[in-house]
Amino acid sequence: MKEREIPVYLFTGFLESGKTTFIQDTLQDSRFNAGERTLLLVCEEGEQEYEPEHFFGKNVTIQVLDGIEDLTEDNLERWADQSRCERVIVEYNGMWQIQQLYDSMPNGWMPYQNMLFFDGGTFLNYNANMRSLVVDKLQDCELCVFNRLADDADTLALHKIVRGISRRADIVYEYKDGKVVPDEMEDPLPFDIDAPVVVIEDRDYALFYRDLTEDPKKYKDKIVDMKVQAAVDRRFPEHHCAMGRHIMTCCVEDISFCPLVARMEDNMQIENSGWYQIRAKIDLRFSRLYGKKGPVLMLRSVEQAQPPEQQVATFY
């Protein structure tokens, strides 16, 4: 017997970010709520309370979680059975990691839509003081809504923070007067990919690495010039090493070395952990170090170099 699939609509964001109001309006809308049996999981309670008497269809079961300890597979399955729900809406607590929810989902629960809400007046403070939680919410969302924005809000700053974490999320700005403006800013790369030699400045390695790994075909046969750190291991194939930088996405705990496979010429001497200014042609080929086809730096020149001022690359 085929397992019943239940779509899960996830609404995330910090306290008083507008999640409850949006969900209330959505469940009052006959275009979304035509009477489907719905389980609404409320993982935090703010000042705004739900008014179920105004829901269209009158077929919504509200379950309030007292704490993260309630977020278990057994509880979720039991509540789903009791409500006989056809779909689940989750108003998620912004202080909880998203993975906690995914790990607790019963079989058959399918994430269908992930929307994230930020209060435009408090977002920068959250980003400065709780960046790991901001990154946690941004990296998996499909739509990011900044609401309650002042007319003079710096949307470019908000845009850059989102794009430093996610390039797939749509962004919408909602102002205090109710005006809604979709983000249509372009994200030009900070280097000229069409130049005879693509020069990657120290500050831009993280953006280069992400763009290359997401769309390697557009870099095939490009010549790049950049400063990287080498990793040498006797287990690597002959004349091969790895070259890259450490990248931090959100906090110290997630720093990781993000290298590319490099093919050395016979006369090149590379030391493990050494810093080098390199010029290389990018080829796309199978490498045992990747375990698949990927970008390989065909080294043309290698010169010892001083480490960059900021040795860990970032997206912001």
Image (spheres, rainbow, N blue to C red):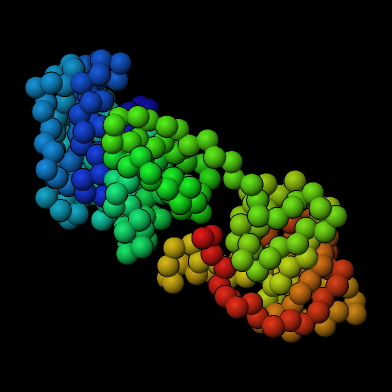
- Relative to residue 96, is residue 218 drawn left or right? right
Taking the spot 75% from the left edge, 51% from the top edge, the residue there is 193
Across and down, in percent, residue 181 comes to: 42, 32
Task: Determine the residue positioned at 26% across, 56% down.
Answer: 95
Image side of residue 46 versus residue 234, left or right = left
Horizontal and vertical percent for residue 179?
Answer: 35, 29
161 lies left or right of 214: left
Name the residue located 75 percent from the left edge and 46 percent from the top edge.
218
Task: Say above or below: 91 vs 190.
Answer: above
37 up-or-down from 192: above or below: above
Q: Decide if residue 248 is in sight here.
A: yes
The residue at 55%/72% (across/down) is 312
Question: Which one is in front, 305 or 285?
Answer: 305
Whether residue 133 appears in this view of the structure is no
Q: Position of residue 151 (x, y in %)?
A: 35, 40
Q: Is 127 positioned to the left or the right of 14 in the image?
A: right
Taking depth in this image into account, of 87 and 73 the one nearest to the observer is 87
Q: Residue 79 at what x, y percent from top left?
A: 16, 37
Q: Quadrant of residue 132?
A: bottom left
Total tally of numbered discs in the picture:
0
Quarter of the image for residue 285 reads bottom right
Which quadrant holds residue 117?
A: top left
Residue at the farthest front position: 152
